[in-house]
């Protein structure tokens, strides 16, 4: 089947993360079985009780857990789309570009994976090849984390699909979240002596956090732009009315640690900052709830995989500041790079697209990578 038709089929199956991905997994499983691959589904219920599936397809089931010399990895879920985008699930070609939700992120890579396998002579492969399809990447890499926790397979080399304009990305920052809750004491605002403002306390704490963010800039990783762990307070809410001294203030902190830095280190620094406030103000009440602490990843620039993909694409390797499933593949034993057709800057947008030429080039790159690692 032509790669464009496969992409059209995939885009036609709505697989927004909030829904079950059963339909797209069913399609992929059928396609893999037709190719003669052995498939394994790993189903789970997400936090809302919705069925989600990871799918692993292998040319041969060798070992338990099975081992693969090469794994091609694509996430099946997409971000939601605006209902006004009436062609979101109809792949539409215009001026050499294919439009549709997921066309860029990351169904184009999945279409290229299937086509590359179709165009390979699987009978002549000596080393096992795995196709890995995951759920809930966009919500927090939940599918890939489950695969890693279950040790569902072992992988020597992984190519993780994400739109990189076919540039191999050999390192990525991590992704972390924490919620900070600062408490005060509510009172009538006409009588401040009876209360303590949670917002004022939070403001003071935020100043300390800003200093911490400045200090993090000193721990540099030259291959990234910006070359340090970034820090953002993206949400804040506090207080109930203009004439009430606020009893509570909450804010959400996000940081993206450079690889090599333990994601929990920033968490410790935040805790230290709260302790400093406690020493300064005996009445201070604040706590941190850790959310995600996803680590970054880095594959050596002179690794065989990086060199191979550089030579197949003609593009020098780079780094990404967004989260990917590469760290989970590394947990499964892999050397990993992130690669895919399409530009991350158009991903998640209404009207996301993939250039036809990149889609077709990706098929050829993956076919050659299969030949390299599995023959
Ligand atoms: Zn993606």
Image (tube, rainbow, N blue to C red):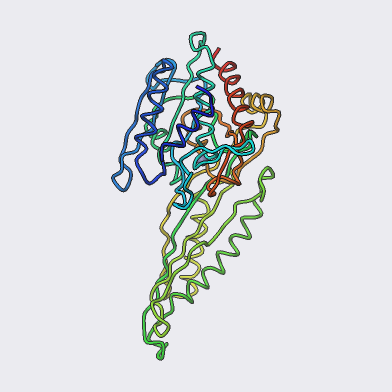
x, y percent for residue 210: 59, 64
x, y percent for residue 262: 53, 46
Placement of the C terminus among the 4 image quadrants: top right
Q: Nearer the viewer, residue 82 or 189?
A: 82
At 46% from the left and 65% from the top, the residue drawn is 251
320 sits to left or right of 142 = right
At 45% from the left and 31% from the top, the residue drawn is 9
Vertical order, 146 against 38 (above or below): below
Q: Nearer the viewer, residue 50 or 260?
A: 50
> Among all residues in the image, which is located at the extreme bottom?
190
Vertical order, 270 against 306 (above or below): below
In which quarter of the view is residue 311 placed? top right
x, y percent for residue 59: 44, 16
x, y percent for residue 370: 56, 19
Vertical order, 208 against 365 (above or below): below
Count of residue discs: 0
At 36% from the left and 29% from the top, the residue drawn is 26
> Among all residues in the image, which is located at the extreme top?
124
Vertical order, 129 against 247 (above or below): above
């Amino acid at each position: 089947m032509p790669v464009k038709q496969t992409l059209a089929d995939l885009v036609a199956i709505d697989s927004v993360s909030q829904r079950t991905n059963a339909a797209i997994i069913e399609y992929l499983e059928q396609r893999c079985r037709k190719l003669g691959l052995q498939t394994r589904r790993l189903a789970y219920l997400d936090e809302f009780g919705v069925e989600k599936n990871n799918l692993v397809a292998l040319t041969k089931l060798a070992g338990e857990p099975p081992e693969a010399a090469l794994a091609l990895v694509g996430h099946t879920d997409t971000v939601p789309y605006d209902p006004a985008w009436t062609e979101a699930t109809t792949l539409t070609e215009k001026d050499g570009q294919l439009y549709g939700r997921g066309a860029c992120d990351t169904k184009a890579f999945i279409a290229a994976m299937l086509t590359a396998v179709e165009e390979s002579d699987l009978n002549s492969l000596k080393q096992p090849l795995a196709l890995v399809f995951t759920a809930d990447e966009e919500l927090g890499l939940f599918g890939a984390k489950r695969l890693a926790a279950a040790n569902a397979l072992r992988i020597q080399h992984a190519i993780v699909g994400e739109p990189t304009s076919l540039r191999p990305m050999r390192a990525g920052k991590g992704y972390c979240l924490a919620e900070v809750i600062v408490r005060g004491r509510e009172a009538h605002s006409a009588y401040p002596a009876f209360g303590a403002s949670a917002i004022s306390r939070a403001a003071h704490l935020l100043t300390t956090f800003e200093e911490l963010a400045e200090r993090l800039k000193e721990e540099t990783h030259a291959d990234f732009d910006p070359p340090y762990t970034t820090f953002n307070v993206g949400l804040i809410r506090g207080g109930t009315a203009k004439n009430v001294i606020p009893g509570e203030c909450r804010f959400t902190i996000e940081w993206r640690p450079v690889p090599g830095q333990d994601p929990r280190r920033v968490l410790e620094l935040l805790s230290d900052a709260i302790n400093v406030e406690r020493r300064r103000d005996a009445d201070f009440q604040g706590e941190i709830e850790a959310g995600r602490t996803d680590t970054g990843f880095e594959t050596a620039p002179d690794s065989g995989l990086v060199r191979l993909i550089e030579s197949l694409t003609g593009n020098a390797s780079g780094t990404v500041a967004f989260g990917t499933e590469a760290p989970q593949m590394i947990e499964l034993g892999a050397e990993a790079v992130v690669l895919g057709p399409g530009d991350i800057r158009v991903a998640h947008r209404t009207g996301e697209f993939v250039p036809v030429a990149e889609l077709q080039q990706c098929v050829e790159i993956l076919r050659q990578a299969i030949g390299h690692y599995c023959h």
